[in-house]
Image: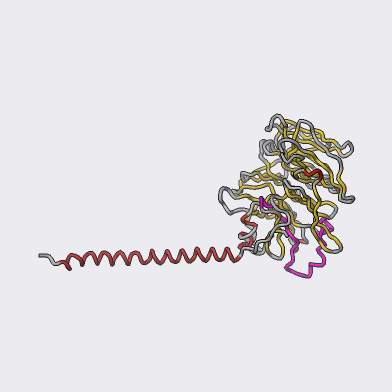
Amino acid sequence: MIKTNQLKRPQLKVKSFMFFLLIPVILFSFSSLSCSQDSIFFYISNEPEPQTPLIRGTPTNMVLANNELFVGNRMGNSIFRYRNVGGRTEWSAIPVPGGGALGDIATDDRNIYALIFPNGDPLRSSVIRRFIPATNTWGPVVTMQMYSIQSIFGVNGAIFAGAMSLTDHEDFAILRFNHHANILSSLKSNTSLLTGAITDAGGNVFLATAGSGIFRYNHGFIETSPVTGTANGNIAGLIGVGNSVVAVSSDGTIFFRTMAGTFETFNAGVSFTGAMGLWGHRANQWRPSLLLLGIRGRGASRNQGYREMVLDVSGNPTLTLRIPGDADVSSVGSRPRYSASIGQLPVEAIIQLPDISRGGPLDFSPFLSDPEWQPPIFAATSRSGLWSYRDGSWNAEE
């Protein structure tokens, strides 16, 4: 006969062997959990204490005029101005007239132009009204028959608008505001929505569209064909950078103008919102050192915020993109703080406040004795209000 304990002995050996095999797995699991917890705690430790933004929801574009910064709350009923009052910078609100919903704002460098939807529906009706900061008064209503205005931009003292046909929502026109006659006139029909207007270092005006590319505007006329290299481009935003022009699309494409005047492209692998702003470094006497580009994460991604494009000593794009905080010359001092704050939110517009000598509301001189001081950066986020970078941290602007 075979004894019972002789049957059990081999099973005990197998169980003991399996237990020793599981020890590294168990230890690895505890190690992984510990690392994960450390990562979570490190992330939480860098999150800013939440603040309630002064400008809630999704803010509009931000524009400078008369050494003041203007920004509105999109589909809200106020425009906010940031200006120097008695030696201190402060915010104040300007109610939108008529109780309509604000679409966007633009400037001719002196006055503010507000795109307003009187009944709150952008697809039904729209008007443009001029606010005169010097007198705090509003001008008359300006509209365009058969169109609903969807976008508005100012460049070189001119105001351009993108309008959608009321009978065909896939048919757009580019309009220009006539200051003297106080009317809108059509410059180009059967095109795509106007998404940007800028001027380059040579004074050339470029108008971007969401699907028809970039057009050059000269002496009251838009050229028939888009600039070479931009045909059918779905442009989300563009900006003049040094002697060049840079544009972005939501699919991650970056367009840049070459010395020959044509555009070339490359894909950055992120989704751009169209937010674009220049950032100056104090070591470069606040001249542009970086181009800040707003991004939006795909799906449930928390990879949002903005990216930095490095500029050369002349302020021209180098096409080198990086995450804020990854280099000594950066718009932020800490990548973890960036990632735990504005890095979680889509950035729809961004601007670093310039000195009063360059059109901004802030006099830099009293702060220059502090080697760590930087002028504030304002960022309009999607649905989370206006944020600002102050004292080394991003948080909602109170």
Total numbered badges shown on the rendered structure:
0
Foreground pick, 281 / 35:
35
Which of the pair 139/159 is nearer the observer? 139
Q: In the drawing, does residue 179 fall left or right of residue 16? A: right
Instruction: Name the residue: 33% across, 64% down.
Output: 21
Between 261 and 84, the residue placed more toward the observer is 84
Percent position of residue 181, x then y:
88, 36
What secondary structure do most residues of the magenta stretch adopt?
A: loop
Q: Position of residue 4 (x, y in %)?
A: 16, 66
For the rendered model, the colour scheme is: secondary structure
Q: Which stretch appears magenta? A: 355-383
Residue 198 is inside the magenta segment:
no
Give the residue drawn at x 78%, y 50%: 79
Quarter assignment of residue 286: bottom right
Relative image position of residue 294 (x, y in whole percent): 67, 51
- List x then y, in percent, for residue 280: 74, 58
Q: Is-magenta flag for residue 361?
A: yes
Q: Quadrant of the C terminus?
A: bottom right
Residue 154 appears in the picture as rendered: no
Q: Nearer the viewer, residue 270 or 78?
A: 78
